[in-house]
Image (cartoon, grey):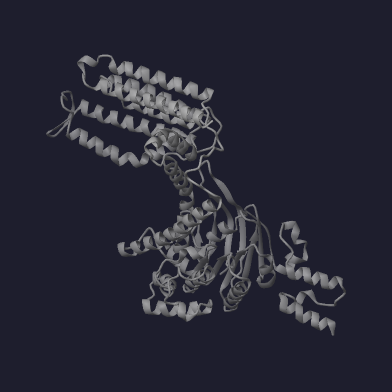
Amino acid sequence: MNAVLGSYVNHDTFIHRMDPRNKFFCLIVLMVAVFISYPTFEMTFIVGGALATLIISLLLIAKVRILDVFKSLRVLWFFILLLMIINVFMPPVGAENIAFSMGKVNVYWEAIFQSLKIILRLVLMIMLTTLLTATTKPLDLTYALEWYMAPLKVIRFPVHEIAMTISIALRFIPTLLDETDRIMKAQSSRGVDFKHGKISSRLKAIVSLIIPLFISSFQRSEELADSMEARGYDPKAKRTRYRVLRFSFADLIGFILCGAVIAATIVISVYKWTYVTPHFVPWWILSLMLVFLYMLLTALITAVVRRHRK
Amino acid sequence: MPIRFNDVFYTYQANSPFKSEALKGVSLEIKDGSFTCVVGHTGSGKSTLVQQLNGLLIPTSGSVEVNGFTVQKRHKSLRNLHNLRKEVGIVFQFARYQLFEETIEEDVAFGPMNFGVKKEEALEIAHKCLKTVGIDESLFKRSPFEVSGGQRRRVAIAGILALEPKILVLDEPTAGLDPKGAREILKLFKELNEKGTTIILVTHDINIVYEFADDVVVMNEGKIELHCSPEQLFKEDVEKYSLETPLIQKAVNKCLEKGLKINPAKIRNVHDLAVEIARAKK
């Protein structure tokens, strides 16, 4: 099994102990910091470097293996290469500093910087998501998601059902992988070659994998549904949690840290805004404000609902 | 040519935080034409051991020699795994999951066809094998998903028998079969063994070992604890290998305690026991 985007690894660190809801929020805030546009390329790389240092030290604190992060970057190589080529042949508007020429094509410094900037953002984004997924149990993530979606209950959106479905789906990913492995072994023993051969025989090979996989999944879901019903599961019922999520001291520190980072980056990007791109600032600030407002509102609604229930 | 394991180590998910050592230096020789049982706890490495036999798993270090093939990291034999898989047939514990064709006969014929047998011929082989595992002719055109779990297991076993392997590996073949069905299947394996097929049977059930095996491999925590004949194994106190005493042996011991003069060496199953008791009573 290859770990895509770093599956959960159990450690007891500061970051593992954080409330998943808060971690989710901090991730979004840091993502915003990564994706804000900064006035000049120099600024982008300086801030990018600072963010990279921060994120890498967080990864180290969380005992995530940096090598694994780069392994999951492998998938992006092709994308990065394509990006480079497109940027070189279609330089950004206003590019004037020629780095070197290849025949008739001029390669601009701006084009190179532009692609480097995008690569930096991608790498940071992947590091951040790895940080989240490697330190948070998938189930906790679903709880966090459910909590954020709680206000949608007002418009009769089936929040609990969706969270339940997601958590069941997450729960069964490893099971399905095991099953796939098992079926592939059984079929290989019958002479199926999944790696070589003509297209027609490979199609047959895939059919011999997919059908048993489907059959056992259907069987499994039926059994699961039956056993849930047998234990009296009712999606409408009021329920308590085995693990109660709590906002702890670790969360406060994380929250303040992310707040400081986002504040610093906003200040940097607002600085000089008049003579770079005059229209971008209000949009980012607005969306940020909205996110904060939404957080507050959710917390408020949850608090009110809880009081009401008592 | 015997099967030979040379100091085989196997680690699942090596180089990851989830790594687990399943085999820790296994050296073993399995004689041609023998009926070898592999016993041990869950997680003792039995299944991992047998999956090395047709290259489904490649040893992390060490090598496995099977009929002139060498299963070893970066060995040129690995390019020829297809041929190795014709020689070694493995029936898995959850064999019923390997069925996918529209009819039972086509499913059994699928294996031989992968090894280049023509369809008509493959169907003929399929019919023969289905009959040997005790599937009625009326079921041949039915879907494998319509029949019962036990029958599905038989179809899956037929699917491997159809490859006519020289070495047949069975991982818990009787799980989920009723006692009568289980005995029939085991007798079938014994017959195949008498015709020259090497049988390697992974099991929890010590009674099967007592009755059928010529050779026993006891595994514990990825290592071979004991490799001997069943007579030798059952002479000792098997419970020290955390195995149970076979029911027949318990009965024999009780009879001896009560003073019946029976000959334990002659007794492999219930029938033998009955004959011996009758003889002793005379």
- Residue B281 position within the rendered picture, expressed as x and y whole percent measured from the top left: 84, 82
Give residue B185's quadrant in the image.
bottom right
Q: Nearer the viewer, residue A33 or B268?
A: A33
Work out which quarter of the rendered image holds the C terminus of chain A and state it.
top right
- Residue at 78%, 80% in the rendered image: B276
- Residue B48 position within the rendered picture, expressed as x and y whole percent measured from the top left: 56, 56
* Residue A67 appears anywhere in the view: no
Locate residue A160 relative to residue B41 in the image: left or right. Answer: left
* Total marks in image: 0
Q: Residue furthest bottom?
A: B282
* Residue B239 appears anywhere in the view: yes
Asked if A125 appears above or below B258 in the picture, the reply is above
Q: Nearer the viewer, residue A301 or A283?
A: A301
Q: Nearer the viewer, residue A115 or A149?
A: A149
Asked if A165 appears above or below A216 in the picture, the reply is above
Give residue A24's quadrant in the image.
top left
Asked if B277 appears above or below A155 in the picture, the reply is below
- Residue at 77%, 63% in the rendered image: B236
- Residue at 42%, 34% in the rendered image: A150
Locate residue A195 relative to residue B25 in the image: left or right. Answer: left
Locate residue B108 relative to residue A99 in the image: left or right. Answer: right
Q: Residue furthest right?
A: B259
- Residue A82 position within the rendered picture, expressed as x and y whole percent measured from the top left: 25, 39
- Residue A149 position within the rendered picture, expressed as x and y whole percent measured from the top left: 40, 35
Asked if A40 appears above or below A104 in the picture, the reply is above
